[in-house]
Image: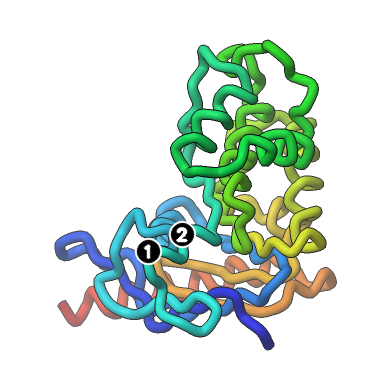
């Protein structure tokens, strides 16, 4: 199996609170990998370590068989939490600000607007966009550097059903463009509809990881993993 990203015993603590505990992720190239877990399970912390927003307490992140380096961000795009957008600018102008900052050719703007289906927004200010349009523009920002790996943290949060459907189709389109996607969510149905592979995080522990079998009862599997790791945490607490 050819992996674009792996983590080896990845851990993160904030003072005495260990929120990520020896996680070994394996992300195959050109797939949608769903990172599933309840709120507070450690998903966002893992993604922030992948993007250099946080440093691991211990463990290692590997990108295409080498240890993660700052320059690897040149091949990674990310939308974590809300996109930082200028509400008084148009979609094109928002992207132009980034191309100037990153030294990217302006011709790339129209390419990414086409990908996320925002090419016809014209002079409309981003402050007037729907939540779904803002999410797609955030993804366009993440695509500007033509990444091999796209990381999306809870991208459907706050979207209406139409926005969710549009975003789902967009995410599914990326692997055929040569872009691997890691998408986190606490919503089982979202992961089941977009992901080829799934990793289940509970209490900072990767309790399950495999290709997503469409015949499997994902809710039953999720509850089993969550309960097992909740018990493990309780047992650890008894020995403190």
The reply to whether callout 1 and callout 2 are in contact (CB within 8 Å) is yes
Instruction: Determine which quarter of the picture holds residue 120.
Output: top right
Look at the image and tell me whether residue 41 can be seen: no
Screen quadrant of the C terminus: bottom left
Residue 138 rendering spot, x and y as whole percentages: 58, 36
Q: Residues within 10 Å of mark 2 (few under 14, many from 20)?
A: some
Please give left or right for residue 77 compared with residue 32 in the image: left
Of residues 196 and 140, the one nearer the viewer is 140
Of residues 224 and 96, the one nearer the viewer is 96
Q: How crowded is mark 1: few (under 14 residues within 10 Å), some or many (20 or more)?
A: few
In what element is the residue under mark 2?
helix
Badge number at residue 49: none
Residue denoted by label 1: 70
Residue 182 rendering spot, x and y as whole percentages: 60, 61
Residue occupying image coordinates x 37% and y 59% = 52
Residue 124 rendering spot, x and y as whole percentages: 67, 12
Instruction: Determine which quarter of the picture holds residue 238.
Output: bottom left
Q: In this view, does 133 lie above or below 61?
A: above
Question: What colour scheme governs how the chains and residues are painted in the rendered image of this protein?
Answer: rainbow
Residue occupying image coordinates x 61% and y 67% = 222
Q: In this view, does 3 lie above or below 31?
A: below
In this rendering, the count of numbered labels is 2
Residue 105 rendering spot, x and y as whole percentages: 61, 41
Badge number at residue 73: 2
Residue lying at the far bottom in this picture: please name it: 1
Please give left or right for residue 138 compared with residue 71 in the image: right
Q: Is residue 89 above or below residue 114?
A: above
In what element is the residue under mark 1?
helix
Screen quadrant of the N terminus: bottom right
Residue occupying image coordinates x 61% and y 18% = 90
How far is disc 1 from disc 2 in space, using C-alphas? 6 Å
Residue occupying image coordinates x 63% and y 33% = 137
């Amino acid at each position: 199996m050819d992996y674009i990203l792996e983590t080896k015993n990845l851990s993160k603590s904030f003072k005495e609170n260990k929120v990520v505990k020896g996680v070994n992720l394996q992300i195959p190239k050109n797939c949608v990998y769903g990172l599933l877990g309840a709120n507070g399970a450690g998903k966002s912390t893992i993604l922030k370590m992948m993007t250099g927003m946080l440093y691991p307490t211990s463990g290692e992140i590997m990108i295409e068989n080498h240890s993660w380096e700052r320059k690897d961000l040149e091949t990674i795009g990310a939308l974590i939490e809300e996109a930082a957008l200028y509400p008084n600018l148009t979609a094109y102008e928002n992207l132009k600000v980034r191309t100037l900052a990153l030294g990217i050719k302006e011709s790339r703007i129209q390419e990414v607007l086409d990908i996320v289906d925002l090419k016809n927004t014209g002079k409309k200010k981003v402050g007037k966009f729907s939540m779904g349009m803002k999410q797609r523009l955030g993804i366009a920002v993440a695509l500007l550097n033509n990444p091999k790996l796209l990381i999306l943290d809870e991208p459907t949060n706050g979207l209406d059903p139409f926005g969710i459907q549009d975003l789902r189709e967009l995410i599914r389109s990326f692997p055929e463009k040569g872009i691997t996607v890691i998408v986190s969510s606490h919503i089982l149905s979202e992961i089941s509809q977009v992901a080829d592979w799934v990793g289940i995080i509970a209490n900072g522990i990767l309790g399950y990881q495999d290709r997503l079998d469409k015949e499997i009862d994902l809710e039953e599997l999720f509850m089993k993993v969550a309960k097992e790791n909740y018990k493990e945490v309780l047992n650890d607490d008894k020995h403190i």
